Amino acid sequence: MKTVLVILIFFSFAFSVYAQADNPINARSFPELLLWIARVFLWASVFGLPIGIISAGVLYLTAPGNPNNIVLAKKIILYCAVFFGTMMIIKLLISAFAGGLTFTATAFLCPKNILF
């Protein structure tokens, strides 16, 4: 088993010399990389916020008389709001320090290159 693993590792390194990959992020500098990462997390929070709020609402509606589920649903909504606010603040700070501070909502959430 070890010999098979050694052979596979050897061939993977041998063929990786000939393989060339393009940069999928297209970041030319470290601030651009930070902006891309912040943008990805912001979009994840934009899509995750309604899912979290809807799931908390369903949990709240299906928990009549169960105080543990009611408290859990309120915590889910609070944590979703805090996470979304944190991602917005982080994106704003990285944009400000990376040199691309924008004040419009469309430029803040939807720049030219959303993920690419």
Image (cartoon, rainbow, N blue to C red):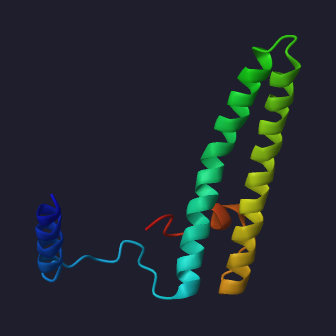
Position of the C terminus by quadrant: bottom left
The residue at the point 80 percent across, 30 percent down is 73
Position of the N terminus by quadrant: bottom left
Residue 25 quadrant: bottom left
> How many discs mark residues in the rendered view?
0
The residue at the point 83 percent across, 42 percent down is 78
The residue at the point 54 percent across, 71 percent down is 36
Describe residue 62's horizontal placement relative to residue 112 as left or right: right
> Between 53 and 100, which is closer to the camera in this rendering?
53
Describe residue 108's horizontal placement relative to residue 28 as left or right: right
Answer above or below: position of 87 versus 6: above
Q: What percent of the width, then of the height, locates residue 53?
A: 73, 35
Tell me if residue 27 can be seen.
yes
Q: What percent of the width, then of the height, locates residue 99?
A: 67, 87
Q: What percent of the width, then of the height, locates residue 24?
A: 36, 71
Residue 88 quadrant: bottom right
Describe residue 82's horizontal placement relative to residue 7 as left or right: right
Tell me if residue 101 can be seen.
no
Residue 74 quadrant: top right
Answer above or below: position of 78 versus 61: below
Q: What percent of the width, then of the height, locates residue 20?
A: 20, 79
> Between 31 and 19, which is closer to the camera in this rendering?
19
The residue at the point 84 percent across, 23 percent down is 68
> Between 90 and 106, which is closer to the camera in this rendering?
90
- Outermost residue on the top side: it is 64
